[in-house]
Amino acid sequence: MKLKTIFAAILAASATAAFAAPETFKIDPGHTYPSFEADHMGISILRGKFTKTEGTVVLDRAAKTGSVDILIDADSLDFGHEKLNKHAKNEDMFDVAKFPTVTYKSKSISFTGDTPSAINGELTLHGVTKPLTLTINKFKCIVHPMHKKEVCGADASATFQRSDYGISYGQPRFSMDVKLAISIEAVKQ
């Protein structure tokens, strides 16, 4: 009887340790799109996205900690308008020849209950790194029916001033406010 109790305790401890371990998720580039909204002379909103993204998310849900590391190919910028894409990629704005990547690296993840609710980190854009907190508007994990692995998805957002990153083209006719939205899916490794 004593052996059964010891065995049960070992199983319970190992199950708890496995649950508490950090889990690594690889960003699915086919389902992850950082997008943004920016003013166009006060008369409309321009919307664009980046189509090439990679990175990792590490979550320890039991400890309520984690990290996010996202790498964006700046040349994958797409407004759905080729002339605008070309202009936005030149020296006036993103200068993708000089600054080929945009990165977001977390410092910490905040939780509300058992759910991640904010990511405190740094955005590097146009060669400038500044603190930026992403609010997680939606978060869900499921066992993906095709991958047969756990997949987590999130929708995160933030607002920043593009002039803080050295992209001040059009000022003062254009507002410098940018709304950033990152729709992300990541597969457990």
Image (cartoon, helix red, strand yellow):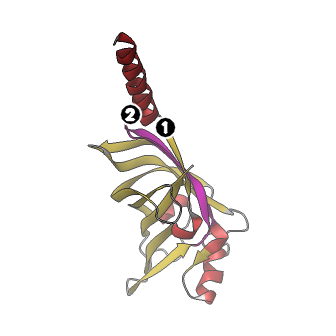
Seen from the viewer's position, the closer of residues 29 and 90 is 29
Residue 84 is a magenta residue: no
Q: Is residue 121 above or below residue 182?
A: above
Q: Residue at x 42, y 36 (%)?
A: 19
- Residue that appears at 43% across and 60% down: 153
Q: Is residue 157 left or right of residue 25?
A: left
Q: Position of residue 53 (x, y in %)?
A: 60, 63
Amino acid on which the number 2 mark rests in the picture: Ala
The furthest residue to the top: 2
Which numbered tag is attached to residue 63?
A: 2
Residue 71 magenta-drawn?
yes
Give the x, y percent position of residue 44: 39, 86
**In the rendering, at what x and y percent does residue 9 appear?**
37, 20
Please tell me whether residue 107 is drawn above or below residue 141 in the rendered image.
Answer: above
Q: Dot 1: few (<14), some (14–19), or many (≥20) neighbours within 10 Å? A: some
Where residue 76 appears, as percent x and y from the top left, is 63, 73
Q: What's the magenta region?
A: 51-73
The image quarter containing residue 135 is: bottom left
Q: Which mark is residue 22?
A: 1
Per the model, the C-alpha gap separating discs 1 and 2 is: 9 Å
State the predominant SS element of the stretch in magenta.
strand
Evaluate if marks 1 and 2 touch, with contact meaning CB atoms under 8 Å apart.
Answer: yes
Q: Residue furthest left?
A: 113
Q: Quadrant of the N terminus?
A: top left
* Residue found 61% across the figure and 82% down from its top: 85
- Which element is circle 2 on? loop
